[in-house]
Amino acid sequence: MIHSSGFLSIVNDAKSRVRETTVEEVKQRLDNGESFYLVDVREDNEWNNGKLPGAVHLGKGVIERDIENTIPDTNADIVLYCGGGFRSALAADNLQKMGYTNVISMDGGYKGWATAGYPVDKPE
């Protein structure tokens, strides 16, 4: 997907303030049984087509509104992912502004996860 320069500008700005992790690091954390929230910030139609195992869905359009009810602990370990790592960086930036201290964006997103051949939950 080709993104507009304005969108890339705000993504790069957000990425200058958020921590990022890789698809491989998230897979290893899951394999090691680490406890953290894995949050999919993609649109409903993307979520309905497949997700990472164990993920919860808080779409980019509602995450700021719903995060405090879903994950009230602002110190919780949270990994956000989207399709490629851009929207999750924007969401991570906003969650940090809301006081969340341990939020990370997964660079590569769902596409990187699937391309690596890692398991995904698909609808039946």
Image (spheres, grey):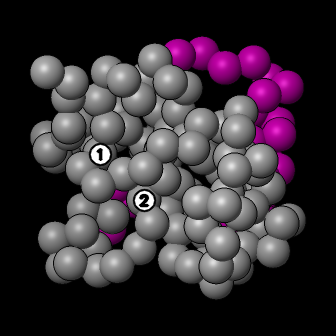
Q: Amino acid at mark 1?
A: Leu
**Gap between marks 1 and 2 measured at Cα:** 8 Å
> In this view of the protein, which residue sits in the foreground, 108 or 78?
78
Residue 89 percent across, percent down from the top left: 65, 50
Residue 58 percent across, percent down from the top left: 57, 44
Mark 1, residues whose alpha carbon is within 10 Å: few (<14), some, or many (≥20)?
A: many
> In this view of the protein, which residue sits in the foreground, 90 or 1?
90
Is residue 21 shown in magenta?
Answer: yes
80 shown above or below 111: below
- Residue 38 numbered tag: 2
Tally of numbered discs:
2
Left or right, 67 with respect to 16, comes to left
Residue 113 percent across, percent down from the top left: 28, 43
Magenta stretch in the rendered image: 1-25
Left or right, 18 with respect to 41, comes to right
Badge 1 element: loop
Q: Which residue is mark 1?
A: 52
Q: Residue at x 85, y 65 (%)?
A: 97
Residue 112 percent across, percent down from the top left: 33, 40
Q: Residue at x 80, y 55 (%)?
A: 94
Badge 2 element: strand
